[in-house]
Image (cartoon, grey):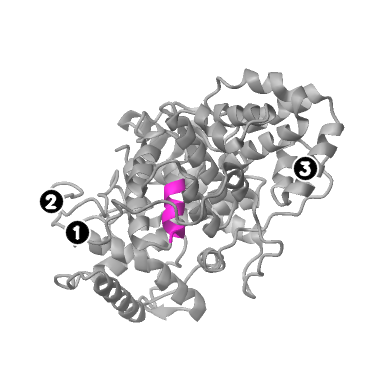
Amino acid sequence: MTSRSPRDTPIRLVPRRPLTAARRTATTRRSRPPRPPEGTPSVPELARLARAELADAVRLARWAGTGPGTAGTTGILPDTTVRLAADDLGLTPGQIRTHWDRARLAGLVELHDGTARPGWRLRAWDNDDTAVLRGWVALFDAWSLAHPFLPGFLPGGEAGADADRGPDPEAGPDQTAGPGPAPGPDPALVAEVIEAAPQLLSFLHLSNGPEPIDALLDLLRQRVAELRTERHEPPADGDPLPALLDWTLEAATLVGALRPRDPLRPDEVALTALGSWAVWVKLEQICVAAQGPAGHMEQSAETMLRACSRLSPGPARAEYRAWLAARPVALAVAELLDTARGDDALLRGLAFEALRVVGDPAEAAVRAVVAEPTLRPYAVLWLAELDGGDPDTATGLLTREEATWLWVDTAAAVADHGEDHLLVSHLETAVQGSVPGLLEEVRNVGHPRTVQVLVALAAAHPDPALAKAMRRAAFQVHNGEA
């Protein structure tokens, strides 16, 4: 083990805050987000590009929601289902597996008790540009999982096109993609290239035009050398960085962040409009701005809650009161609980915030859902607060597994709707005492958004060692190893 091991790393990165503050991290926003660079396409145009990029993944996700799309406990489609999907959708089995991975990573499908079903993003796909962009950004963040490095990788070739899945680039040097290919480079070096990739993409974004691959290779060499010096590691054997850079560029192209290389200028690369926008979002650490809400008394609970996600707690409570006043209490409570049963974790938390405004009249309905696994953690805390209990001590009424599930659910809300630094800060609210302990329990808790949460944490976290551990955990969950 080197000094990069997260074995004993404490989780508490910022001073302890009460659980009620953690629940609010998903809705903490900047009042006026920065404007994107001049020339950036509009949100509808960016969403159109993202829909085109994920069109086959969406088709497959919808097929899985209406056909025999059972994926089993590992999330991997069985061969019979792959062949049936290929026949129905006019794709090859390799394309089905590729687009299935993309659909899972983008949040278009989720696993519940071994069965795949449409995720909330898929239901919002045709009419919510923000959901579409967040789905594509989730895939962009997970490019190294969508197209893992395979020993013997040849850019543009067949090595990764039809492979059911590749090795974990951080799991160890003995892993191979199958019989035949020679062993690849040191997995730690692959992880360092993944860590250096944002700097390469930022360089392309700031240059605002095609750049020679040689310039990117020089930058990659410099960054990897810095990382190895910081960690007191020897230089890599041979010269694997050109192949690793080719893999990185190929993977970024396949997820839609880089333009396909121009045959007339094959030694240059450039970001797509989507890629440039996503890098800008990362650099600015903001989310896509949603429409500001104003008067939603006659709208559905889901529409009202989405609008209130842009408000601070005081104005949001006023909006809840106005919405509740416009309908019978029993019907309003039932609609809020039905919205909370959906797959959007932010709406689940906000629904219970609205129920806090209802108070005593909602008690019977909330007690009735305590037995529902998805709603139980929220309901237990809501009832404890109604009885005058301290929300922080109320967590003792939850099992360890339920508390961890709630932590992942809140992290999913932050990842979908909050800023990167809020996601990192959310780490300190976990009940575990170390990063490995948290990752072990998160991997086993069975939350359908576990992979996306771990990938988002890895992308946001400033500590390379912790980010690496999170990427590895995400890879293991993605491959059904949890």
Q: Which mark is on residue 180?
A: 2
Q: Amino acid at mark 1?
A: Gly
Q: Position of residue 65 (x, y in %)?
A: 51, 31
Residues rendered magenta in the picture: 453-461
* Mark sitting on residue 317: 3
**Cα gap from disc 3 to disc 2, whole angstroms:** 62 Å
Relative depth, front residue between 144 and 456: 456
* The C terminus: image quadrant: top left
Disc 3: CA contacts within 10 A as few (<14), some (14-19) or many (>=20)? some
> Going by the image, does 169 lie left or right of 20?
left
Quarter of the image with the N terminus is bottom left
Is residue 153 in sight in this rendering?
no
| Circle 3: residue type | Arg
- Determine whether 363 is above or below 257 in the image: above
Q: Could you tell which of marks 1 and 2 lies nearer the N-terminus?
A: 1
Q: In the rendered image, which residue does mark 1 sit on?
A: 152
Q: Position of residue 314 (x, y in %)?
A: 77, 48
- Determine whether the residue tagged by mark 3 lies in a helix, strand or loop: helix
Residue 46, disc: none
